[in-house]
Amino acid sequence: MNKSTIAICIGTRAEFIKAYPILLILQEKNIPYYFIHTGQHNLFDLCETFGVKQPDVILSTPPKKSSKFNAQESKAIKWAIGITLKIRKEIKKLLDLKYFLFHGDTISTFSSAFASSKFLNWNKKYQNVHLESGLRSWSNKEPFPEEIIRRIVTFFSDILISPSEKSALNIKSRKTIFICGNTILDSVDIASKIAKKRDLKPFDKRFALVSIHRHENLKNKKRLTDIIEILSSLKIPSYFPIHSNTKKQLIKFELYDKLLENKKIKIIKPLDYILMIFQMDKCSLLIADGGSIQEESLIFKKPIIILRMNTERPEGLESNFQYLSKLNVEETKKKIKEYLSKDFKVKKFKNPYGEKGVSEKIVELLK
């Protein structure tokens, strides 16, 4: 029987990227942990890249491509129910368990929180821990389903570890809350050191890096049309690592060819995390609808156009180099022009997510 006092459940690549520094510290300190992989994404290459042990158990066969669902809601709900029961079964095997960890706001996060909660384990002696807790956009559809999952996970969790003071203040409950900072600081630091050992070159002397994948953007023709118009205004070389689901939706709405009309935009294959971090460090502008990239923008002090209506990471909006576009085409074009102007300077801004060493702090907290 496994004697681990700590278990962690991870489903997606984004969860892994935020959590792997914690796992590395556990390994360095010879603290045994039980690694449960739901199989929502494929994590094998990431484990190898960052020196994390392969999962102790895999609850479903990971997909070869990006995700199991690609926004198929009915399939996702059915999968979540089955995975919840499987996670609970694994927890029952861990007789010495003290802490059960999960990260973020994905379907795997929801299943982890519910499976480890007192509602399914009324006599449990361990505590479940939500990493990156308290993020809120205050709009259930922006982003969907992540915003709803965050609120549910807060309810089912015993210990909440928040990345900033603002996120902690969002939690309206009598939970045990710790503000430790954001583990992305450690993730980027480790990835950057690996990148330096590789023979990598910037895409260009001056370029923009584009990332579009949010459900609420891809499923809305009007939004995608506005996004393509914004991208079409770019005057510098712009590199767009495109995922299959994004390309599929652009083709469906007859927007893909319009995107290609701008010869400055280069459509490329998705980048691994090391290469993405390297190019992010070298670029002149980020244009994206993701969440973590807003945090990475703060680390690298890179101007970013956020192609969303709301964000659960408002901390960066207090800087002069993060712009929430609300998909206002003309105003966003003006902001792009401003950010790319030779006169634009990033003003000094203290990172609200702390300094590197967050993962060590979390491990010490658990000890």
Image (tube, helix red, strand yellow):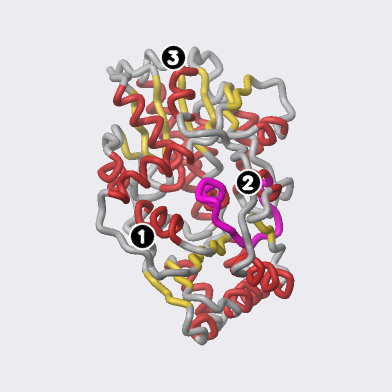
Quadrant of residue 141 within the rendered picture: bottom right
1 or 3: tag closer to the N-terminus = 1
Compute the Cα span from label 1 to label 3. Answer: 37 Å
Quadrant of residue 343 within the rendered picture: bottom right
Label 2, on which residue? 348
> Which of these two is toward me, 83 or 314?
314
Label 3, on which residue? 367
2 or 3: tag closer to the N-terminus = 2
Magenta residue span: 295-314
Which amino acid, by three-letter code, is at mark 3? Lys
Which amino acid, by three-letter code, is at mark 2? Lys
Q: Quadrant of the N terminus?
A: top left
Label 1, on which residue? 65
Q: Residue at x 35, y 27 (%)?
A: 25
Please state the total of marks drawn on the protein image.
3
Q: Is residue 147 visible?
A: no
Q: Residue at x 46, y 20 (%)?
A: 99
Which mark lies nearer to you, 2 or 3?
2
> Residue 131: which disc?
none
Tell me residue 275's x, y (percent): 35, 57
Specify whether 188 is left or right of 344: left
Q: What element carries label 2?
A: loop
1 or 2: tag closer to the N-terminus = 1
Compute the Cα span from label 1 to label 2. Answer: 40 Å
